[in-house]
Image: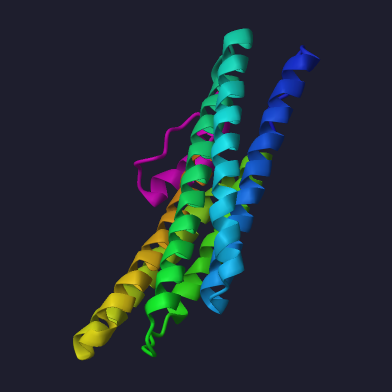
Amino acid sequence: MPDKHLSSKFDADLNLLLSRLLEMGGLVESQIAYALEALKEFDTVLVDQVLEGEHRLNDMEIKIDEEVTNIIARRQPAARDLRFLMATSKCITNLERAGDEARKIVKRTRRIQANVGGLHVNAAEIKASGEMALHILRRALDAFARMDTVAAAKIVRDDEAIDNEFKAFVRKLVTSMTEDPRTISIGLDYLFIAKAIERIGDHAKNIAEYVVYVAKGADVRHVSREQLERDALGSSQN
């Protein structure tokens, strides 16, 4: 949560902004959950639902960004308040892009359903990594709402597990396509889905990094995990 100010209107502006970011985050979570369920069940209704939801996400991103600009112009914030506003703008960009990844998943799911032709690829790692990505996105949004830097640092660490699942799946997929070239087409579709899930994890990690930026005043986007953890636990700047 943003810090309290002498101006109750400023507090209300910041709290409303946060609530809108979390609302957008909730929609992205739903989009990803529907995309994963569509992949599991090959449910065309869910595919269409995800594609339709993308327009709402785009509108939310534009409106929240406009509100960030308006608050900066009216209040001329400094220090942590300015960091919060800048981080909010970057977080909604990451959320919109995570929503784009959900769209990519359902579009590839539709291709798989149409062209599978009896061929099968074991995609257990994709389903596991998808659930992991959705889980850390939820945790990242919760950490941002509470400005919990300890939780944020843990999310960055956990994102590595998604990367490892992706690498394991790619190795297995290459072996499968080598042994049976007929699986190449469907294998490439699953590869695009796996990459989309990995990117969702990356966007969740980015949001977690902005928690540390707002709370501690440290830009940790391109530092080692160990340095990020030290910054997350260190003293905050105004």
Question: How many numbered marks have been drawn onto this rendered protein structure?
Answer: 0
Q: Is residue 5 visible?
A: no
Frontmost residue, 89 versus 50: 50
Q: The C terminus is located in which quarter?
A: top right
- Region rendered in magenta: 212-237
Rendered position, 147 above or below 184: above
Residue at left 43%, top 52%? Answer: 202
* Relative image position of residue 235 (x, y in whole percent): 55, 33
Report the front residue among 57 and 115: 115
The front one of 61 and 217 is 61
At 59% from the left edge and 50% from the top edge, which residue is drawn?
Answer: 53
Residue 132 in the image: above or below residue 17: below
Counting from the top left corner in percent of width and height, residue 230 is at 46, 44
| In this picture, residue 130 sits left or right of residue 222 | right
Residue 163 vs 233, above or below: the answer is below
Any magenta on residue 221?
Answer: yes
**Which residue is more in the foreground, 132 or 112?**
112
Q: Residue at x 58, y 52 (%)?
A: 52
- Color theme of the render: rainbow
Q: Is residue 42 magenta?
A: no
